[in-house]
């Protein structure tokens, strides 16, 4: 393989299209007279794309860290409006040059078939008139982040962000839990119409994209666009059914047991996180400095190589962990592809769920680091269904290291909390996915019809929770799911990946070292193999039907039976 770096200007500003344009034009005009020249074009294009992607990554990171900073917001939006559309156009030309080249058939299938399959799909679906619609959709998502990031409430004598308020839901005083939940809910409902308006615009834009590409609806277009070669919408429906039959009954049993343990008639929305025996909430760390130090020790104990990888992120502006006003919600890991340096973003407030987020995003970073050696940008990532295996597995594989954060008793509580949450997570994944299937196959729906669909899905997949008096909060609950706004149909991946992570956890219970070996071997492949082969490399089965779900949930229930409530 030829692997010669493209010569690029020493001071290239990749946030400016006038500097990128000549470089892309040169690639588009390059002579392709041999298979070696085609391969070099692919590699040089990969290098240039990585520089452009990192420029966007840095702007996005800066904006989400401070959504209230107009300079950062304007810089990100300028890239979205001025550079990204031109990158799409230039990329489409290169996609066609590569897949239509007579030398493409001479490229090594073992090395390039996965890459070429993706490019053929990109070329088939590209439409020039979708570029401005995609730009507008990204702008809408940024506005959702701005609105969400600006939310705060005054509670307990001070102004607090939404992530900071989560700790009160673990308070043993029920009146405190109710008061905090009600305050947060009321604050979110203040922006309900605004967020509904953003979502209405996104639905309309996405439906137009689908029609432009020759599809009847955005669901079918997006499934193709996300390169879901190995499963279809009908398989998603099978997953919904499997969750409904297997996980929902378990979740409702757990809710009824919770109500009995707490001595209340039914579980209310503010009763789901408090300890059943009245113990103080789990507090795994005091501040993010302590979180990082303890997480490092945990990873070094789990696997020395993973520990070294984690420590490599403790410098070089790789972490922004604390919650603060003006910061976008949620958490993510973003690989800066030119420097091949991961970045972890989260909103830590000292909770058990923050620890879970930390090891989850570290799993993504491990994936980025283990696959960063590949000269082909497309292979320095993987389909999200497997990318989330990398992160979700870490939540489970670090169970033996929880003593870095907790006493044995509290460590058992943390394990139980995460395993019980699986019975909630999978139904929530099914809810969000089914919601999107309905939304985008019924693009002309009204807001009232959308609410009714959401409530129907809650009746199908929801827990045994009493929402009386707070029906508006339930009707708007979907608005908290940021993926609906910025990453449409990116959510069932969490369900598929959770099943993969549970299989890896099952391996680790029998042979911990083999599980880690499988984990790292598969992550090193990046996206160079089709999805079923990536699962197979980790010793996993790519399946999310009823039998698989049932078997794994039985494993979870067996483990829960050994952990005191």
Image: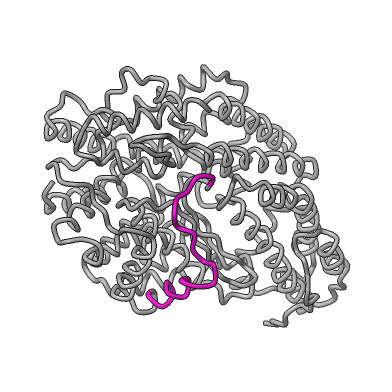
- Classify 452 as above or below 227: above
- Residue 490 location (% of width, % of height): 52, 45
Which one is in front, 285 or 240?
285
Residues shaded magenta? 307-326
- Residue 200 location (% of width, % of height): 61, 27
At a point 38% along the width and 65% down the height, the residue shown is 289
Q: Is residue 546 left or right of residue 486?
A: left
Q: Is residue 394 magenta?
A: no
Q: Is residue 325 magenta?
A: yes
Which one is in front, 41 or 65?
65
At a point 18% along the width and 47% down the height, the residue shown is 280
At a point 37% along the width and 40% down the height, the residue shown is 165
Which one is in front, 162 or 216?
162
- Residue 97 location (% of width, % of height): 80, 62
- Classify 128 as above or below 321: above
At a point 74% along the width and 52% down the height, the residue shown is 79
């Amino acid at each position: 393989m030829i692997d010669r770096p493209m010569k690029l200007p020493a001071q290239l500003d990749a946030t400016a299209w006038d500097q990128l344009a000549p470089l892309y034009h040169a690639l588009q005009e390059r002579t392709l007279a041999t298979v070696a020249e085609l391969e070099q074009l692919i590699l040089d294009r990969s290098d240039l794309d990585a520089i452009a992607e990192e420029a966007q990554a840095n702007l996005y990171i800066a904006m989400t860290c401070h959504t209230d900073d107009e300079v950062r917001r304007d810089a990100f939006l300028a890239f979205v409006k001025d550079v990204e559309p031109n990158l799409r156009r230039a990329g489409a030309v290169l996609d066609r040059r590569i897949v239509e080249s007579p030398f493409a058939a001479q490229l090594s299938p073992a090395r390039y078939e996965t890459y070429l399959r993706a490019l053929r799909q990109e070329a088939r679906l590209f439409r020039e008139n979708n570029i401005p619609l995609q730009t507008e959709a990204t702008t809408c998502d940024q506005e959702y982040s701005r609105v969400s990031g600006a939310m705060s409430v005054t509670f307990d004598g001070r102004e607090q962000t939404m992530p900071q308020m989560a700790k009160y839901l673990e308070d043993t005083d029920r009146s405190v839990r109710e008061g905090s939940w009600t305050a947060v809910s009321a604050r979110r409902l203040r922006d309900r119409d605004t967020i509904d308006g953003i979502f209405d615009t996104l639905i309309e834009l996405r439906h137009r994209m689908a029609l432009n590409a020759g599809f009847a609806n955005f669901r079918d277009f997006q499934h193709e666009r996300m390169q879901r070669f190995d499963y279809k919408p009908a398989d998603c429906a099978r997953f919904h059914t499997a969750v409904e039959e297997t996980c929902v009954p378990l979740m409702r049993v757990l809710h009824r047991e919770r109500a009995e343990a707490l001595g209340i008639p039914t579980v209310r929305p503010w009763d789901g996180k408090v300890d059943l025996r009245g113990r103080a909430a789990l507090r795994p760390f005091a501040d993010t400095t302590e979180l990082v130090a303890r997480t490092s020790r945990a990873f070094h104990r789990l696997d020395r190589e993973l520990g070294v990888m984690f420590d490599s992120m403790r410098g070089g502006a790789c972490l922004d962990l604390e919650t603060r006003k003006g910061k976008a919600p949620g958490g993510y890991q973003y690989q800066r592809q030119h420097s091949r340096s991961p970045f972890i973003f989260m909103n830590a407030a000292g909770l058990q769920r923050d620890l879970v987020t930390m090891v989850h995003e570290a799993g993504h970073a491990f994936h980025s680091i283990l696959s960063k050696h590949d000269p082909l940008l497309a292979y320095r990532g993987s389909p999200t269904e497997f990318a989330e295996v990398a992160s979700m597995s870490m939540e489970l594989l670090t169970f033996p290291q929880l003593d870095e954060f907790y006493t044995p008793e509290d460590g058992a509580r943390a394990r139980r909390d995460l395993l019980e949450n699986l019975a909630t997570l999978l139904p929530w994944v099914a809810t969000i996915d089914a919601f999107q299937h309905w939304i985008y196959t019924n693009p002309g729906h009204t807001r009232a019809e959308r609410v009714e669909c959401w409530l129907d899905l809650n009746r199908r997949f929801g827990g045994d929770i009493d929402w009386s008096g707070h029906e508006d909060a339930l009707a708007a609950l979907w608005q908290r799911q940021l993926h609906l706004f910025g990453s449409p149909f990116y959510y069932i991946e969490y369900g598929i990946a959770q099943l993969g992570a549970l299989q890896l956890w099952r391996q680790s219970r029998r042979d911990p070292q083999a599980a880690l070996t499988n984990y790292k071997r598969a992550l090193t492949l990046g996206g160079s193999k089709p999805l079923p082969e990536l699962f197979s490399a980790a010793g996993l089965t790519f399946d999310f039907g009823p039998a698989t779900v049932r078997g794994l949930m039985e494993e979870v229930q067996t483990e829960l039976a050994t952990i005191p409530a």
